[in-house]
Amino acid sequence: MLAVTFQEPGRVALEERPEPEPLAPDDAVVRVESAGICGSDLHIYHGRVPIAPGFTIGHEYVGTVIAAGDEVTSASVGDRVLGAFHTACGTCFFCRRGVYQKCDDTRVFGHGATLGSLQGTQAEQALVPHANLTLRRVPDGLSDGSALFAGDAMATGYHAVVGAGLEAGDTCAVVGLGPVGLCAVMAARVAGAARVLAIDTVAERLDTARSLGAEPVHATEEDPRAAVKAATEGRGVDVAIDAVGVPSALDLACRIARKAGTVSVVGVYAERIELHMGIVWIKALKLVTGHANVIGHLDSVLALMASGRLDPTPLVTHQMRLDEAPEAYAIYDRREALKIVLSA
Ligand code: NAD
Ligand code: ZN
Ligand code: ZN
């Protein structure tokens, strides 16, 4: 089968790989019909998250179950499914508390040896461990391009908002308007945020945020701190979300959050960075960080998507073939696309 593999920073390739087979009784194999490219794939593409050359990348996927072990009960061969970007065992200390993303045995698709050596889903087929937790049937009426958001970008945007404890009537600012940030905008609106300020530098992404009901703020041509002050009687927002994963975005999020507010950090950090702890401490900020609990949120997110209350359809800007992945990565890296869906 064909698979998209990391080669070196700035280069991915199409390579032949053996077709996967179920290894454990709760494994499934999915024929991947659509796979997304995510901002997290860009960290790999840039060499910031190191993985071995030749490793299959990608972790957003929709497809059909083509093989399943005896213990897979939540989906059957022939079912159209989507999956979470990570797996969980379901029985460890953390899983028993519902913190699936911190499962002792969690593995993230397409992230190499450091995150569980699980081959990625930008491939014609993918092995899915612990399929009863990882997979869900796609609700009727959802396109592939929409459904694959449930297993990553939408669940992460939802996690950014719900994990921050955003309440109806709160103000929210989202720094970074890639698919994750725009999903956070949608989730904040659905959670009842009174105002959502959306901060980025890419004009099309600011326009999309406006169409989703947010108030766009250009990160450099305008003054985001002044814009937040003006919108909040000088206080700062109740919830500030870093949906980028660079120190300047986290710094901005900490400065625009109100005293005793929450900074929700879904942008990825894999290295030591400098953070002004004095600001965090003096303002008594709450920091919420880490991978999203996608498995924990999957049913709620899918229900909201099936009802149309969360609708990522406008974020799919490009449909391309799997074998166009090298070009797709280059386009996404130039921020000329929002969500690129690769189809085999
Ligand atoms: P993306 O690369 O498409 O979007 C990032 C956006 O941030 C871009 O629009 C860019 O213009 C903007 N940006 C960059 N620097 C900025 C700055 N200083 N101020 C304001 N905006 C800035 O990525 P994405 O797919 O939307 O993902 C966003 C982040 O979330 C990435 O770090 C990704 O790895 C991470 N992520 C985390 C999880 C999780 O489980 N926590 C899940 C999925 C993605
Ligand atoms: Zn992702
Ligand atoms: Zn576990």
Image (cartoon, rainbow, N blue to C red):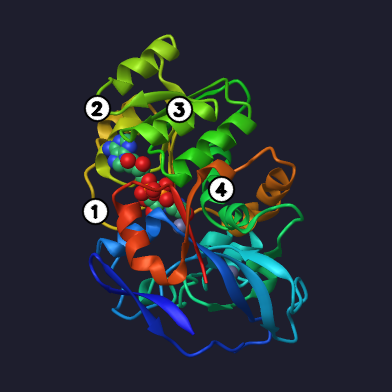
Circles 3 and 1, Cβ within 8 Å, touching? The answer is: no
Q: Tell me the element at label 2.
A: loop
Which sits earlier in the primary sequence, circle 2 or circle 4? 4
Give the Cα distance between marks 2 and 4: 27 Å
Classify the position of ligand 3 by quadrant: top left, top right, bottom left or bottom right.
bottom right
* Figure disc tally: 4
Q: Nearer the viewer, residue 273 or 78?
A: 78
Q: Which amino acid type corresponds to the residue marked 2 in the rendered image?
A: Thr
Q: Which amino acid type corresponds to the residue marked 4 in the rendered image?
A: Met
Q: Quadrant of residue 311?
A: top right
Q: Tell me the element at label 1.
A: loop
Left or right, residue 73 beside residue 222: right
Q: Which amino acid type corresponds to the residue marked 3 in the rendered image?
A: Gly
**Residue at (63% x, 52% y) in the render:** 297
How many residues crowd mark 2 within 10 Å: few (<14), some (14–19), many (20+)? few
Give the Cα distance between marks 1 and 2: 25 Å
Circles 2 and 4, Cβ within 8 Å, touching? The answer is: no
Q: Is residue 4 above or below residue 292?
A: below
What number is the disc on residue 272?
A: 1
Q: Quadrant of residue 310?
A: top right
Circles 2 and 3, Cβ within 8 Å, touching? The answer is: no
Q: Residue 130: where, in percent of width, then height?
A: 63, 75
Q: Which residue is mark 2?
A: 220
Q: Nearer the viewer, residue 281 or 112?
A: 112
Q: Which residue is mark 4?
A: 154
Q: Which residue is mark 3?
A: 261
Q: Residue 306: where, in percent of width, then height?
A: 73, 47
Give the Cα distance between marks 4 and 1: 27 Å
Left or right, residue 18 beside residue 304: left
Which sits earlier in the primary sequence, circle 4 or circle 1? 4
